[in-house]
Image (cartoon, rainbow, N blue to C red):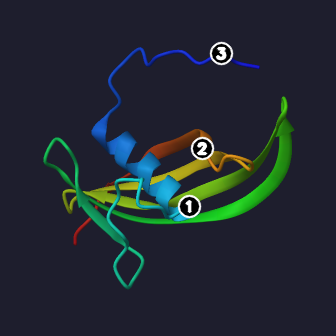
Amino acid sequence: MTVWRPATREIDPLEEAVANAARATILPTPTINVPPPSSDGIRSQLLRDGRELRLLLSTQYLTLQQRGPRTVVVYAVRGNAVLDKRIGYRVTGQAVLDVATRAFLDVECRLESAGSVML
């Protein structure tokens, strides 16, 4: 079992927003600071550094596992992101949710550049 360690670097605002949106897609609660999606499923928000992010994410149940003493649910995360209405990204990742506490144990989202987009 791994031991918790403090972050060694400041998380990028874009990475933070995508991870929070993934959490809110799986478990929509008011404690996750993410605006709700619009009627078309797109989340739009301003990052803490002033950039605008538009996200369309989906999640899919992958498996139920035991991790040490904990039962966890593993989800796949996929979608698209557009930053400042001009830079596109493909989003892939995985989220791990503790069944008993409903706490996220891990959320990993990878952003792959899709180049320029026109909105």
Quarter of the rendering occupied by the N terminus? top right
Residue 115 or 25: which is nearer the viewer? 25
- The numbered mark, 1 or 2, whose residue comes first in the sequence reads 1
Q: Which residue is mark 2?
A: 104
Q: Could you say which disc has been placed on residue 3 in the image? A: 3
Which amino acid, by three-letter code, is at mark 3?
Val
Q: Could you say which disc has been placed on residue 13 in the image? A: none
Q: Which picture quadrant has residue 55?
A: bottom left
Which amino acid, by three-letter code, is at mark 1?
Leu
Alpha-carbon span between mark 2 and mark 3: 15 Å
Q: Residue at x 42, y 77 (%)?
A: 41
Q: Which picture quadrant has residue 45?
A: bottom left
Q: Position of residue 71 (x, y in %)?
A: 82, 44
Residue 106 or 108: which is nearer the viewer? 106
- CB under 8 Å between callouts 1 and 2? yes
Q: Residue at x 75, y 51 (%)?
A: 73
Residue 79 or 87: which is nearer the viewer? 79
Q: Residue at x 41, y 53 (%)?
A: 32
Q: Which residue is mark 1?
A: 27
Q: Is residue 57 left or right of residue 36?
A: right
- Answer above or below: position of 54 versus 50: below
**From this viewpoint, which residue is outermost toward the front?**
101
Q: Residue at x 43, y 56 (%)?
A: 21
Alpha-carbon span between mark 3 and mark 1: 25 Å
Which amino acid, by three-letter code, is at mark 2?
Phe
Badge 2, how many Cα within 10 Å: few under 14, some, many 20+? some
Alpha-carbon span between mark 1 and mark 2: 9 Å
* Element type at mark 3: loop
* Element type at mark 2: strand
Q: Is residue 51 left or right of residue 54?
A: left
